[in-house]
Image (cartoon, helix red, strand yellow):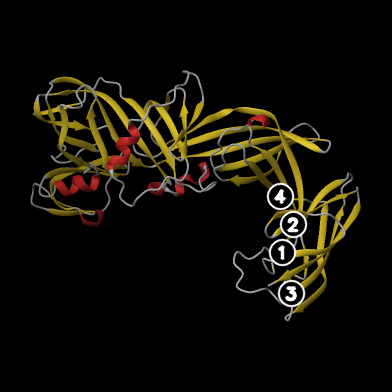
Amino acid sequence: MTTAALAADNPDYSLTVYSSAQPGQVSTESLANYGPGLPGYALVRDGRKMTLQAGNGVLKFTDVAKRIDPTTVAFESLTDPAGTRVVEQNYQFDLVNRDKLLERYIGEHVTVEQQRGDALERMSGMLLSSADGTLILQRDSGEVVSIGSYSNVLFPSLPGGLITRPTLVWLVNAKQAGTHDTRVSYQTQGMTWWSDYNITLRENGGGCDMDLSAWVTIVNQSGASYPQAQLKLVAGEVNRAPAPAPAPMMRMKTMAAPAAAADDGFQESSLFEYHLYTLGRRSDLPDNSTKQLEMFPTATKAGCTKQLVFTASPQPWSYWAAPIQEQNYGATTQGTVGAFLEFENKEANKLGMPLPAGRVRVNQASADGTLEFIGEDLIKHTPRNETLRIKLGNAFDVVGERRQTGFTVDTAAKTITESFEISIRNRKKTAARVIAREYLYRWSDWTIAEKNHDFVKRDAATIDFPLDIPADGEAKTTYTVRYKW
């Protein structure tokens, strides 16, 4: 006997969407380039009322995503979980299309329509072949014709074995007959999400503040629609084996959602070593759609710092096999002055929420009051109480260069001594603070032997010289570094 989900039932959808995209990898403009390779997936939970018979019965379920992973499917009765079990599961995906219909109708009678000018001509007969898009038809008179161009083919009926939607078929053994509350869970490809952040920057004297808004974009190309679904997003790098098994999915689907008011936005909570964002209201997610939702209310007047950083030296090596003794390596360089924005992701700074990876766009009001785009950068998954650093671009009116003024190698003492002069010019009409950032790239063991400005050690191979430069002025800093190996 075959039973089916009640057609009148409204499904209770709950979706947890995962993204495997790198920050900034996917945008609404690039979605068409991915197709089935969209970097992400979703865990779908579908609650239904289904009629089961006592003993073994066949249950067909048609409302599943076309890009479902059938190895992750789980069915359970919430009414009688102990007395209901799936004995056998099948996934039928032989969907009807033109080529399959033509293949099934070889040797059968069909009607072919051809457009000839303004008239529509019909030709009937037995279909002998449909190879390479050309139909070979034997008419009732015995005449065999080859039809290379046609507008339509009429078939008497849908042949058995073909279905219009992917279908899950279970052999279910139930002790309790009647209507059961059930839940179907599975993973599907064709879904992903990402974050976008928008900053409105305001400079005030020597400092700045900003407004930060965050938006989530959810893409559904799974081949199914999910009306009034509860939406959850997972931020973090969740490892996936090449062939995912259903057991981890079963454990995850029993987790309770964080409590939230009906009209709330996303509520953040911990999930293992990741972060879970649950939308406090239900939302429609149609197939082939892109939805944007506010992640959290705009944070206004959060504190920030603008930095101008001059860099001209080569980056330090990640691994030193031996000291770099070539004198001309990085000796003289014209550098760039990068413009950066820093802010603390702390509650005291009106933020303090784990920020999923995404693109940060920064705007600032121009002289006429209109907002203008001034730069963007990507951030990784950033926990609360961390400092974010956004590169906006390179400064137009601040330039500089770095030149080597001395170099000696003492192989007996195993030392390299090197001196530099850094010159930075500020052509702005206002004073500027510029950080001259130096990478100590020749060897890991170093000391600053001489300097004319104080410096700050940023890390094991980086030092910063903060320089205050007057309007249309110049600042020079010199230092000598000694490497020992």
Asked if one can make out residue 224 in the rendered structure from this viewpoint, the answer is no
Q: Residue at x 68, y 31 (%)?
A: 349
Q: Which of the two discs, 3 and 1, sits closer to the camera?
A: 3
**Considering depth in this image, is 7 or 57 the residue closer to the camera?**
57
**Considering depth in this image, is 485 or 17 the residue closer to the camera?**
485
| Residue ID for mark 4 | 393
**Considering depth in this image, is 291 or 123 the residue closer to the camera?**
291
Instruction: Please rate how many residues cluster around mark 4, counting C-alpha atoms within 10 Å: few if below 14, some from 14 to 19, many from 20.
Output: some
Residue 420 spot, x, y in % from top left: 82, 66
Q: Which of the two discs, 4 and 2, sits closer to the camera?
A: 2
Q: Which mark is residue 415?
A: 3
Q: Which amino acid does label 4 sit on?
A: Gly
Q: Which amino acid does label 1 sit on?
A: Leu
How far apart marks 3 and 1 lie (CA) works out to: 14 Å
Q: Which amino acid does label 2 sit on?
A: Ile
Q: What residue type is labelled 3?
A: Thr
